[in-house]
Structure formats: C-alpha cells, structure tokens
Image (tube, rainbow, N blue to C red):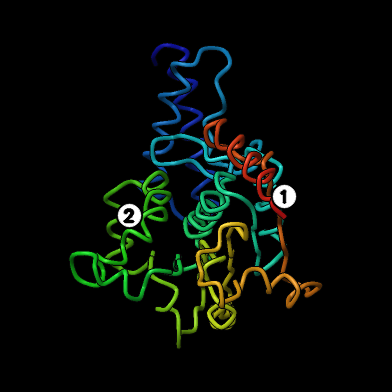
C-alpha cells in the first residue's frame, strides 16, 4: 500500500511492461528505463498527465527516447513520411533544411530496430569533399569523414542512451558510413537511410538503390535546392524523380516551408532565398 497516486502509476507501469513483453517477447532494460522516465514526468504533470505508454499509436508519437521524451511527427510533411514509410519499401523525402526529414527518418529506423522488424540500421551520406579538400583535414580516414556524418550521430544520440548506442556501433547493429562504402554490398534485414542525397550522382544513386536486399526498407532524404556537386554533374536526387515515378513500392514525399521546425528565422531565410532566386531567374 502507498499513496493513491503512486499506486496508480505503479499499476500503469506494470500493465505497460506486460503489454510490451507480450508484443516483443521480452522487455529490455531500455524499456524499463523509458517507462520510469515517463512515470517521473507523469508524477509531476498533475491532472493533465499523458498515459504511461510505449505504444506508438498515441497521437503522432513515433517513439520515446531513453529519457521519456516523445519523438513525434509534428508537421504534415513529417506525418506523410511516417505514413508513406508504412506502405512503401523505398521512400524519398525531399524538402528544404529544417523540415525534420533526417530526424523523422532516423526515428523510424530506431523504432524498427527496437521492434525487431530489422536487424540493423545503416545510415549513409555522400562525402562531397572526398577528394582534394578532404586530404587537408587532420587524422585518419575515419576522423576525416566523421564531420560529414556528425548530423546522423546527433540524431541517434537524442534517441538512444549513450552506452547502448556505443554498443550498437561497436557491434555494427547501427552503422554510419560514407555512401561510397555501400558499393558491392547487399543490405538484408536492414533499415537504410541515405541522407543529403542531393549530393549523390546518378551513378551513386543507382548503386545505392540496388544494394537493397530482402526485408529491408530505405529512406532517401535531400534538398534539391542545395546541391554541392560540381556543375558538370547532375544530382541523382533530381533525376530519380522522373526515373522511378509510378513504381509500386516507391513513394515520394515533398516537404516545404510549412514543415520547418527549427528557429522561426530558418523559415524566413528559406522564403527570402526563394524570392531572390525566382527574381534572378
């Protein structure tokens, strides 16, 4: 026996633990940590507390982080990514900076790994400076390339506790690598994300898409207005829209300024650049 409020919270925790165990076959220490974090927040939020639940069908919640924070699809574009990813094996999410393309995609990948629908997550990015300029950076190859991959690490670190993320990286359950490292591989039972795909050439895009194996899903994200490729090279993300249109199992989601979830000024900056570029054209 104890205070009524605490008893109710404990009952909710135990009930949710049973539900998770039935659904996944077990309950992990990470699940317990998340439930306790949610319970702590519920205990301090008064009458309007949210249910203590790891269920993903509460609102637009994709998953809960190890601290109990909800990762949600906040905008129409992000919600379209979540919906399209449920019905398609390959999804292209195209839109300007700050629209949450990468963050939402990584959340979906972490969710799939947590629910054991895939065995690993593979995150790739083109290293557009992988020629002369890269050589001026200090360190070995990994240290030279890591700055290009940092945004992917940042997203993962928000969703997975540090020790568990380090374990996954060490075991290659989660792999973060330059796009060039995908060549020659077959990616089975994986959730694969290609980020900043506007900097992939047509050849690289074809190479990446043909790596997809059995029981795998892929999300390709990018901003076709911010291509860093040399002028003579066409972005594979631009041409792919015509090459793969109207193919079952492949979907395109387009985000715009309404989906920007960063500082308000980011949306204003995008609008200003759009007006400037339209005027110059």
Residue at image location 56% in from the left, 28% down from the top: 51
Which quadrant of the figure has residue 254? Answer: bottom right
Judging from the image, what secondary structure is the residue with disc 1 in? helix
**Direction from residue 43 to residue 218 in the image, left or right:** right
Circle 2 is placed at which residue position?
165
Tell me residue 42's x, y (percent): 48, 22
Along the line of sight, the residue nearer the viewer: 139 or 69: 139
Tell me residue 132's x, y (percent): 32, 75
Tell me residue 137's x, y (percent): 24, 65
Q: Is residue 241 above or below residue 268?
A: below
Circle 1 is placed at which residue position?
278
Q: Earlier in the sequence, mark 1 or mark 2?
A: 2
Which quadrant of the figure has residue 73? Answer: top right
Along the line of sight, the residue nearer the viewer: 237 or 89: 237
Judging from the image, what secondary structure is the residue with disc 2 in? helix
Number of numbered discs visible in the structure rendering: 2
Is the N terminus in the top left, top right, bottom left or bottom right quadrant? top left
**Direction from residue 90 to residue 116 in the image, left or right:** left
Residue at image location 32% in from the left, 58% down from the top: 147
Residue at image location 52% in from the left, 68% down from the top: 199
């Amino acid at each position: 026996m104890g205070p009524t409020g605490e008893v109710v919270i404990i009952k909710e925790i135990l009930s949710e633990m049973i539900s998770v165990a039935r659904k996944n076959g077990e309950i992990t220490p990470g699940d317990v940590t998340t439930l306790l974090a949610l319970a702590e927040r519920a205990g301090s939020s008064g009458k309007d507390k949210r249910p203590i639940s790891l269920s993903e069908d509460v609102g637009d919640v994709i998953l809960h982080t190890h601290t109990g924070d909800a990762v949600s699809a906040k905008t129409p574009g992000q919600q379209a990514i979540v919906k399209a990813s449920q019905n398609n094996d390959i999804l292209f999410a195209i839109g300007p900076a700050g629209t949450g393309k990468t963050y939402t995609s990584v959340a979906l990948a972490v969710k799939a790994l947590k629910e054991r629908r895939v065995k690993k997550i593979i995150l790739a990015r083109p290293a557009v400076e992988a020629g002369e300029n890269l050589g001026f950076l200090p360190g070995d190859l990994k240290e030279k390339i890591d700055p290009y991959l940092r945004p992917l690490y940042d997203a993962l670190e928000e969703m997975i506790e540090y020790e568990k993320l380090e374990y996954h990286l060490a075991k290659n359950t989660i792999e973060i690598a330059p796009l060039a490292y995908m060549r020659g591989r077959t990616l089975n039972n994986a959730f694969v994300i290609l980020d900043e795909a506007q900097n992939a050439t047509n050849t690289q895009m074809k190479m990446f898409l043909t790596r997809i194996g059995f029981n795998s899903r892929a999300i390709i994200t990018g901003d076709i207005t911010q291509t860093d490729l040399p002028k003579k090279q066409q972005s594979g993300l631009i041409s792919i829209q015509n090459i793969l249109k109207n193919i079952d199992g492949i979907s395109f989601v387009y985000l715009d300024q309404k989906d920007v979830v960063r500082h308000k000024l980011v949306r204003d900056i995008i609008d200003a650049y759009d007006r400037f570029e339209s005027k110059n054209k």
